[in-house]
Image (cartoon, rainbow, N blue to C red):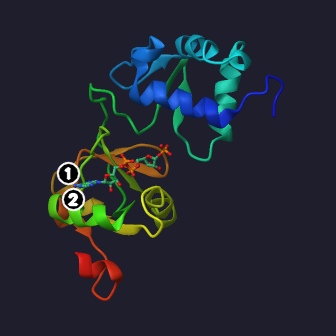
Amino acid sequence: MNKLNINYVSLSRIASHALRHEPWLYELELDDEGWVPVEELLSALRAEKPEWSSLSEADLNEMIAASDKKRHELRDGKIRALYGHSVPDKLLKQPAEPPAVLYHGTSPEMAVLIKASGLQPMSRQYVHLSVDTATAEQVGRRKARAPVLLEVRAKLAAESGVPFYRGNDLVWLADQVPAQFIMFPKKGTDLFSLL
Ligand code: HQG
């Protein structure tokens, strides 16, 4: 704990809500790349809880450093969420060359639907992909006790015209990924009988 008794997990959760989902509830407006002035976010957060009343930029830096995932980026007096957005206006992102393979962890039930219609962003702006299987499993465990790991042939998809975007070092984004570029679990696994 720190001198202001700030719970950084809870701070990060509220900051993500403001920067990803409902900025208008905090009187914030994201620019077309998702940035807001740090001072504007700070004044909104200071009003949320008595123990946040003298929150500073240093606390936001500490929140980012203390987090288990790199969810936010603070630069030149501005801050944004790096991924996860559901705001109505789609953020501008520059396509980048993805690694050969990316992973997506999900539930067995959703994997069946993904086999039929590809990876879709659902309630977010972008599909979220992981650079390694450990991260994808962690993401998938939010959806199922025994998640399914899908392998996305990202380089091949990119070469075929599917854009990919960098989220952070571990997370990549896509508008959608057609099923033809996704490898599903093989014959002999439990999931295969469902697929
Ligand atoms: C599924 C967390 C049916 C998809 C994580 C997923 C991540 C489909 C769910 C980030 C589908 C959406 C995002 C289709 C995809 N039919 N279901 N065609 N295509 N789905 O939570 O990727 O901790 O919006 O498999 O770590 O699970 O918040 O996406 O299960 O990086 O920072 O639809 O959120 O980060 O679920 O997670 P979500 P996600 P934070």
Residue at 45 percent across and 70 percent down: it is 146
Q: Could you say which disc has been placed on residue 162 in the image? A: 1
Q: Is residue 93 above or below residue 136?
A: above
Ligand 1 near label 1 (Cβ, under 8 Å)? no
- Left or right of residue 121: residue 81: right
Pointer 1: residues within 10 angstroms few (<14), some, or many (20+)? some
Q: Secondary structure at mark 1?
A: loop
- Left or right of residue 173: residue 54: right
Three-letter code, disc 1 = Val
Residue at 30 percent across and 65 percent down: it is 109
**Spatial separation of the CA atoms under disc 1 and disc 2:** 5 Å
Q: Position of residue 76 (x, y in %)?
A: 54, 19
Three-letter code, disc 2 = Ala
Residue of label 2: 157
Of callouts 1 and 2, the N-terminal one: 2
Q: Position of residue 66 (x, y in %)?
A: 68, 40
Name, please, the residue furthest toward the right. Answer: 3
Q: Could you say which disc has been placed on residue 40 in the image? A: none
